Amino acid sequence: MSDFSLPPELTREPEVLIESPRFSVVKRRADGGVDFISPLPCPYNYGCIPGLGSGDGDPLDVVVLGPRLRRGERLRVPVVGVIAFLDAGCADPKVICSTKPLRPVDRAGLETFFRVYALFKRVLHFVRGKRGADTRFVGWLPDVTRPSA
């Protein structure tokens, strides 16, 4: 099992950087470059927490629930949960942030999204020559994820 430990510097309300606004089909990296173009729009604001690294060597990923935000926007949002995700065999946790409590419908939507996202990432890895590496939704980190409202 991969180590999904989070950086000790992760605060309860980190500053996040939006790389891909809600409903975007372009997944960007923190440097603004295009990581990939999705066949489906992302239902969430996707970005990172600058200065904090993840198991895959990239900045720690974050999903911000709520209305569409601008690419490049920086804001402070409370952490409501963390999803354990494996990307090409590396721990790649997804920090979930929201100004509102995580509801059961939010949890179900995020689980479905990351299961489908894993399928797309597997295809992307195959195309990029990374064959056979484990990429999947693992679950919620219980010591971080708050109980549903």
Image (cartoon, rainbow, N blue to C red):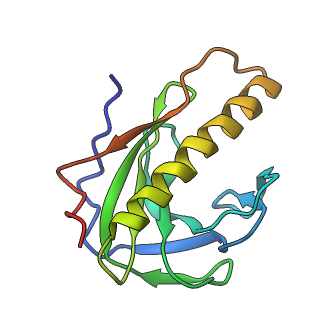
Q: Position of residue 52 (x, y in %)?
A: 41, 56
Q: Residue at 57% x, 65% y: name it.
A: 47
- Asked if residue 15 can be seen in this view, the reply is yes
Q: Position of residue 128 (x, y in %)?
A: 79, 27
Q: Is 6 above or below relative to 121?
A: below
Q: Name the side, left or right, on which 92 lies relative to 115.
A: left
Horizontal and vertical percent position of residue 33: 77, 58
* Residue drawn 60% across the image and 83% down it: 73
128 or 38, which is in the foreground?
A: 38
Name the one closer to the observer, 60 or 27: 27
Quadrant housing the N terminus:
top left
Give the percent coordinates (x, y) of residue 121: 67, 37
Q: Is residue 58 visible?
A: no
How many discs mark residues in the rendered view? Answer: 0
Answer with the quarter of the image where residue 68 lies. bottom right
> Quick one: quadrant of the C terminus?
bottom left
Residue at x-position 62% and y-position 45%: 117
Image: 53 above or below 66: above
**Residue visible at 77% across and 20% down?**
129
Q: State left or right for residue 91 relative to residue 147.
A: right
